[in-house]
Image: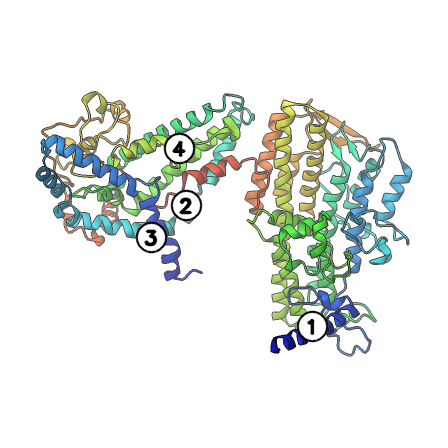
Amino acid sequence: MMQPFDWLVQEYLPQLLDSFFNPQKRVSIGYLLIALLIAICWSVWVRNECSFKGLKKVCRSLFSPKIWFSKSALSDYKLMFINRAIMMLISPAMLSKLAAATFFYFLFIEVFQNTPAILETWPLWMAPVLYTVFLFLFDDFSRFFVHRCLHRWPLLWAFHKIHHTAETLTPFTVYRTHPIEGIIFGLRATFVQAVSISLFVSLFGKNIDLVEIFGVNFLLFIFNVTGSNLRHSHVSIRYPRILEHILISPAQHQVHHSIDPQHHDCNYGAAFAIWDLFGKSLKLSQKSHNLRFGIIDDYKFREHTLKELYLNPFVEVRTLLSRLI
Amino acid sequence: MIKNKLIGVAAIAALVIGCTVSETSGPALAGPDVYGKFPVTLKGYKGSKTNTVSYTGQMARQVLHDSIKKLAGKGNGKPNPALKAEMMSYYSSKAKGRAIVAPKSKGKFVIKQTHVDQISKKKNLSGKTYKGTISGMPNNMTGPELIKFWIDKASSAKKGVDTANGYNYPQLISKFMLGAIFYNQAVDNYLDEKMSAKKKPNNKPYKKGKHYTGKEHSWDEAFGYFGMPAHGLTLSPKQLYSIAKRKDKAMTYADRNGDGKVDLYREMVFGPAYYAAGADKKGKTTYAKTITKAFLDGRKLITSAKGAKLSNAQRAALLKYAAIIEKNWEQTLAEATFKYAGSCFNDLKKLKKSQSSKNLKKYIKHWGELKGFSLALQTGRKKLGETGTRLNRLIGFGPVLMNSSQVVDINSKGQYVKGQSSGIDEYMVHMLKVQKLMVDEFGVKARMKDALSGLGAMVKKLGKGNSAEND
C-alpha cells in the first residue's frame, strides 16, 4: 500500500505536470503560448492598436487580475488540482479501454462474418488516414452528443452547471467540472476509442496507426494550435459566417457560456459546428455581443466555494428525484 | 608490503575454500538462494547423511520426457514397432540401462550423465500420469491412454508429423506431459495431499530408513517436477532459457560447481521451468523466480520445524507457498496456450497467402504445442469446468486445415474421422478467442504472440484519461 506522500510525489505530481507538457493535453504549455500569441494578434488587429502602448494595453486586458484572480478563476484552479486526484483514484475502477476494445473487436468480427482483417490488403496508407479521421470525427460528435445531453437532461445538468457557473473564463475553465461529469466524459472517451480501435483493427488488422504530429492525432493538433484554449477566454475570436457553420469559433463557445437566456442551449460542439447545424442548435457569433458569463440561478454558487461546487449538484439531484417520486 | 601480505592471505584463504569445495560438489551449490543443501532434522537419525534434499526421481522423469519427445520425431512414415517399443520403454518400463536420448551434450555444453540410471533407477512416467479423462480429445481417454495412443501414432508418422490430419506428435506428447505428469504431480499430489496434516508428517521419515522427513521429501519432489536447477534463483530468465537450449555460453552459468559438466540432477533447466523463464524473458512477469522462491522459502520453513510435526500455523504458511506455486505454474501454462494460439493465428494468415509445405508444417507444430498446453492446463488440482469446455471447443480435436477439414472423432480402430469445419477464417477467430479466454480466466501478462496487440498498442498510444475536462 502506497503512503500518501509517496503517492503525491510518484503518481499525482507527475500526472499533473504531464497536463502541461504532454501535447495530447489541451492546456500543455505549447498550446497555451500559441493561444496567447493568437490572442495578442487578434486583439491588436480588432482594436487597431499597433503601437507599443496599444500592445501594453492589450496585454493588460488579457492578463487582467479581474479575470485571472477572480473568485471564479481561483475556484477553477482548485477544482483542477482536486479533480485530478479524485479521477486518479476513481479511474482504476472504471472500465478499461483495452477490455472495452476487446469486447467490441469480437462484436465486429461477428458482424463481419468471422473474417478478421478483411481490408488488410488495401493500400497501407489508407488505414491510418481513415482511422485518424474517423477517430477525430467520432470523438468530436460524441463530445457534442454528451454535451447536449448534459444540458437537456435535468439530472445531468445539475452536475454540468458547475462548469457554467464560471463568471470569468480562462483556459483552465476546461477543468471546472464536477467529478461525476468527469466520469461521464471518461466513459465517453473509453467508448469512442474502444469502438474506433476495435473497428479498424478488425477491418485492417495490424496496419492501423495514427497520423500524428508530436505524438498527437494531427487533426487534434491542428485544433489545439489554432487556439482551442481561447474558447474559454474573454478573447472573442470570430470566424467568417460560412466557416462558423463548419467549425465552432471561440466566440461561438463564449456564446454558449453566456448568461443571456437567448443564448442558452446552443453551440454544444467542440471542433465542428456541423453537429449543431444538423441538431438545430447552432448560433453564430455577432460583433455586437457583449457577453456576461454564468448561470441565472447562480446565487447558490455565488461564492464559488468548493462545498458549493461539489455538493450542490447532489442536493439538486435529490430535490429532482424527490419531485419525481 | 602490507598490501602484499594481504594478497598472500587472500590467496591462501581462496586455496583453502577451493579445496573444501572440491571435496564434494555440494558446497559450491549451497547458498541462501540455492535449493539445498538442507541439514538432517529427523529426530533420532543416526546415519552419516548430512543433506536431506533429494529429488533425483523427478529429474530422471524430466530426462525420460525429453527422451520420448526426441524419439517421437524419429519415425519414417511406416509402422515401426521397434520405435514404438523404444518409446514405451521410456514411458512405462523401469528397465535398466536406458540411454539418455535427450538432452545430450552439444558443443561446449557438456552433460555429465549419459544414462537415466545415473540420475535415478527404476523410474517411469506412466505411473505418474494424470489418470482422469481427457475431455479435449475423443473417446474419453485417460492421460496414460492418450499418451500411449499418441506414441503409437508417432511411431508410424514421418518425423512424428501427420500432415494429412495436422498432428505433430512430439509436440503433442511433450506439452501434454508437462501438465499431465509434472504439473499434476506437483500441484495435485505433493503440494496438495502430501501437505495435509495426516499424510507424510514432518516428525517421521518419508519412508522407513530414510534420513529425510515426510514433508521435507514431499516438498523436494514437487520442486523436482518444476525442472529448475538448484541455483535457478541466481539466474536471469534469459540465462535459464539458454541453459535449456544448451547454448555454449550457458555452460558458464549452468555449471555451478565448476566441474566442467552440467549435472542433469542439479544444474539443468527442464520443460516447466523453461516455459516459465520463456514467458519471463519479456520482462512483464516473474513466474520462474516467484515459483522457485516459493519452493525455497517453503523448504526453509519445513527445515525450521527441526523435525517436529508442523503446527497448524506452519502448515498454513506452507500452503500459502504452495498456492503461489500453483497459481504461477498454472499461469505459465496459460501463457504458453496464449502464445501458441497467437502463433497459429499468424501461421494461418501466412497460409492464406502461401500454402507452402514449410508454412503448413509450422502451423501443425504450433497447433500441437497449443493443443498440448491447453490439455496440460486441464490436468491441475482445480477442474476448469466451463473454461475447459470452451477451450476444447475453440481448439477442437485437430487443426482446421486449408481445405477446411478437421478431425472430429477417432473410431474404434483408432483411425481419425474427419469432418468439414466452418473454415479457416472462423478458426482464426477461435484462436483470438483462446487468447481472450487466457486473459480473462488466467490473467496472463506476458502475452507473447498477442494477435490483438494492435488493440493494446493503440489504446496505449491514445493515452490515459485521468483528468476531468469538458467543453
Q: Are marks 1 and 4 on the same chain?
A: no
Q: Nearer the viewer, mark 1 or mark 2?
A: 1
Q: Residue at the location (19% across, 50% down)?
A: A74
Q: Identify the disc placed on residue A94.
A: 2
**What chain is tagged by disc 3?**
A
The earlier-in-sequence mark between 4 and 2 is: 2
SS state under label 2: loop
Whole-angstrom CA distance, mark 3 to mark 4, is 29 Å
Provide residue B22's location: percent of width, then percent of height. Answer: 77, 68
In terms of depth relative to the viewer, which is nearer, B92 or A208?
A208
SS state under label 3: helix
Quadrant the N terminus of chain B occupies: bottom right
Q: Nearer the viewer, mark 1 or mark 4?
A: 1
**What chain is tagged by disc 4?**
A
Assess disc 3: are there few (<14), some (14-19) or many (≥20) residues with their C-alpha within 10 Å of its C-alpha.
many
Three-letter amino acid code of the residue under disc 3 = Ala
Return the residue at label 3.
Answer: A85
Provide residue B256's location: percent of width, then percent of height. Answer: 72, 60
Mark 3–mark 2 contact, CB under 8 Å?
A: no
SS state under label 1: helix
Q: Give the left or right position of residue A223, taking residue B365 as reference.
A: left
Q: Quadrant of residue B87?
A: top right
Return the residue at label 1.
Answer: B11
Whole-angstrom CA distance, mark 1 to mark 3, is 60 Å
Whole-angstrom CA distance, mark 4 to mark 2, is 27 Å
**What chain is tagged by disc 2?**
A
The earlier-in-sequence mark between 3 and 4 is: 3
The earlier-in-sequence mark between 3 and 2 is: 3
From this view, report whether residue B375 is shown above or below residue B256.
Answer: above
In terms of depth relative to the viewer, which is nearer, B6 or B140?
B6
Whole-angstrom CA distance, mark 1 to mark 4, is 63 Å
